[in-house]
Image (spheres, helix red, strand yellow):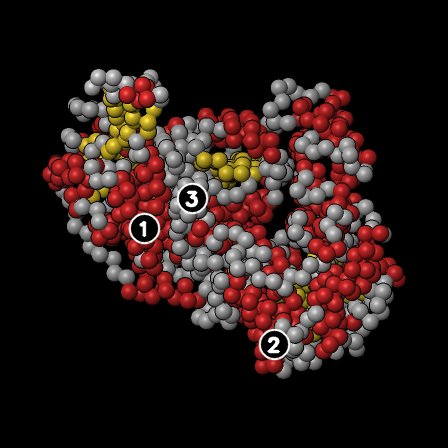
Amino acid sequence: MPRTTDRLPFPYRPEAETVAQRLAALQGALDWAAAAQVAAPWVRAVRENPPPFWAMESLLKEYPISSAEGLALMRLAEALLRVPDAETAIALTADQLGRADFDGAADSTLARLSSTAIAMSKHFLPDAGHEPGLMAKLGARTVVAATLRAVQLLGRQFVLGQTIGEGMKEATAARKKQPNLQFSYDMLGEGARTEDDALRYQASYENAIAAIAQGADPARHPAKNDGISIKLSALHPRYEDAQHERVMNELVPRVWTLCRAAATANLNLTIDAEEVDRLELSLDVFDALAALVAEHCPRWEGLGLAMQAYQTRAVELIAHIAALARQYKIKFMCRLVKGAYWDAEIKRAQEQGLPAYPVFTHKHHTDVSYLACAKALLDAPDAIFPQFATHNAGTIAAILQMGSRQAVPFELQRLHGMGEGIYREVLKNPLVSCRVYAPVGAHRDLLAYLVRRLLENGANSSFVHQLADESVGMDELLISPLRLEPMASLPMPMDLYGAGRANSSGRDLCVIAQRDELLAAHAACVVPLVAEAKAADAAEAVARADSAFGAWNHTPVEQRAAVLRFAAAALDDALPRFCALLVKEAHKTWGDAVSEVREAVDFLRYYANEAERVQAPQTLPGPTGESNTLRLEGRGAWVCISPWNFPLAIFMGQVAAALATGNTVLAKPAEQTPAVALEGVKLLHTAGIPADALQLLHGPGETVGAALVAAPGVAGVVFTGSTQVAKIIQRALAAKDGPIVPLIAETGGINAMLVDSTALPEQVADAVVQSAFRSAGQRCSALRLLCVHEAIADGVIEMIQGAAKELVAGDPSQLSTDLGPVIDAEAFDNIQRHVARLRGSAKALLPEAEAQKPMPNLVPPQMFEVGAISDVTQEIFGPVLQVVRWGGDPMDVIRQINALGYGLTLGIQTRIDSRAQALATAARVGNVYVNRNMIGAVVGVQPFGGEGLSGTGPKAGGPNYLLRFCAEQTLTINTTAAGGNVALFAG
């Protein structure tokens, strides 16, 4: 069963109000000036005796992340170790080091590498005009080998060991220098995408706990033993709120196995923090584990949870965890961290149109929150053993001050490879204990961890970065964070597009109140019946639209825009009702439904603004004595033919574009989804669109649609659908007498994704699964053809197979559903014919659909490996992915994709920046997406539309779209006709 209540407050709260509460809680609890005085000698000692070159502080001093050199190191560390083929490794090294200048660096090896890379880069970058010779290749391989060694050396500084055994040996050596150290081992790895991933990580954790237990003393408190940190998303391939029931049934027993082993040895087992949208789920898992601990091993005090101070509800989280401990009469160990996903949380809130950010936007507000959280942890010694993870000298001194006042036991924590200089000074006090968070794993697996650490601590505002920068004075470095900024440092998500256009409002389906709003609308939703028009009705409808055109066209553009903005606000408010209708009539999942309503709102607002821009009269330069003005007006009655796959967003976009520019509209929605269109038309009429200026004609395309296209007096046609139907419309318009009628057609495509061997497999798997299978593959932009480099194809294909098997196909009204049914039986049968053909001619990579399906027209993900790109000749409009392996020059792959004739969307997955640019330039494709999914174009951000067989352009949601709906008029006036050039005489 899904969750029915939230444990914590609403996450999207006003930042200033929350910080004010945190500051009030710290009143009288902390003397920052005294803490800064304690911290100052530590800072001076570190600056006078800096850590070794490869320590984080020194690395950031030499190569700031904001510099080309720092960025090159980060990119190479992230990708080079996983590249299996020499040619791609050469291209990556040349691309990254060739952009940087290490000549002035302290390490001469890097300077030599850089100069060699620059010299060879012209031979190995994708736009090379010829093949490099043998000697050049040998030289390049030498450079790559040296660069690999440098990256491995970098990795050794931040990964304690490649195995748990190696890590424990390093920990023993470190304790000889600093006896008051403990370690918490983190087994490196990405979150699981497949069940096999999860089981592999489970075995890794079990092996690590067994090894740590051998060196632990069960009689000691867990704080005195080494421990382990685990990531819940590594132990389940669908660790997300929508899969709540499955997570509780499958994940909790797995974690409990680890907990029992840790409890037997009396180790600290900490559950690492995840993103905001998983926090409530993590608390449900933690609660279930706490109940098991209370029942089976109540004396074990080692179960722990990491808490992120950058979250606006961090203090409330601590109160909740303390209450759980008291409820079960056990004690937890809680690690307080600043937080590791700040940039991702900001982007998610912006993309989803959430009311505020779930994290603080000012760094010093996070520092305030951290101190308030520290006080809350220290105030609950009966329930929590606090663990403070920080590298900030001022924060450390403040915690020592607060801890000594309350005489409460706690420990400090740092990351392996970071903060060594500060803790060298702090740990001169033998009463202070510190635990090192120590990653363990193969160097090729360190990339996500290492880059995240570099980005966090390389930011100009971070203490670690400023500590290394001697131009930052002591007063600035240790300035008190105890101050309130009344405004966020970033625009709110609703203000993302500036003052001229509000972002559409979204919903977070992980927040129960927002979810319940949608479910209630679904329960009340009744899909209305829509009367069908007849072909004979077309002529009268066109006549009415033509009669209404004059008055609507002469309505000032500002008034027309105001009507559309009013409609946008009404639709924004009615989001739950329209989402419910989309789920019921169009079989949308909840996430897709929310996105579609938001897109429709965005279209209304964007085209309102654009109409005011493009239809403002333009004064043109010319000779004295005359004025020249260019102005745009509507053309007349437009036929808008929209598809069933986006029955609200595309429908509203077409209609809004035509209306905004002064045209009248004859809207012919898809016959499968007329109710959504009807409700949209009602909303526009209520907003102020005259009835005759917008008419809905529901009926079959072959009759009603054809009659509208053929009718005399139609000024233009805008169509979204298949290439075949677009060509029928094109021929029908060409056959008509009278004016030449413009056609705007957006059609489908054989959309491809090119993956080279530098790509991160987990990122590729995520992008492929979203692009190919989300919305049951019923998007014009959906991925149809995956082209993956032969050197990594086996592993990538296996990961995508595993991830696809985890998807849930079923009733779209259920939150756990990933794929609803395809739109109707005709679509289902067509997909099945294609699947049957591919099962006979290609290699099936996913199992056949089960005979017993939970509902009609359900097509689970299908995946086939084909021999060549040219074998893919038709678009399959459903969740069917074809895969081909490639080798050699990636530019040849783009040429073969271009040869297919379509040109809608293209995905490129590579870490070679120059390659991505060159491939995008060569592609005859409308929308190119690099290192992300290929779906979900945002209005005004990613204008959408293709070329060739994929459409005519201009791009919907872009600055050129409205021009096609307009007629242009140039007005030239002789201003001297009355007898002379007054303006010229006036001088």
Residue 396 seen anywhere in this rendered image of the structure: no
Residue, far front: 986
Dot 2: within a 10 Å radius of its alpha carbon, few (fewer than 14), some, or many (20 or more) residues?
many
Residue that badge 2 annotates: 322
As rendered, which of 936 and 71 lies closer to the eye? 71
Spatial CA span between label 2 and label 1: 45 Å
Residue at (37% x, 53% y) in the render: 593
Under circle 3, the secondary element is loop
As rendered, which of 565 and 350 lies closer to the eye? 565
As rendered, which of 1 and 330 lies closer to the eye? 330
Residue at (43% x, 32% y) in the render: 926
Q: Would residue 774 appear left or right of 890 to someone viewing this image? A: left
Under circle 1, the secondary element is helix
Residue that badge 3 annotates: 938
Assess whether mark 3 and mark 2 are in contact (beta carbons under 8 angstroms): no
| Spot occupied by residue 719 in the image (x, y as percentages of width and height) | 29, 36
Q: Quadrant of the C terminus?
A: top left
Dot 3: within a 10 Å radius of its alpha carbon, few (fewer than 14), some, or many (20 or more) residues?
some
Residue at (25% x, 44% y) in the render: 559
Residue at (77% x, 40% y) in the render: 150
Residue 383 vertical position relative to residue 613 in the rendered view, above or below: below
- Give, as a three-letter code, the residue at label 1: Ala
| Spot occupied by residue 386 in the image (x, y as percentages of width and height) | 69, 71
Under circle 2, the secondary element is helix
Residue that badge 1 annotates: 568
Spatial CA span between label 3 and label 1: 16 Å
Residue 309 occupies quadrant: bottom right
Residue 125 seen anywhere in this rendered image of the structure: yes
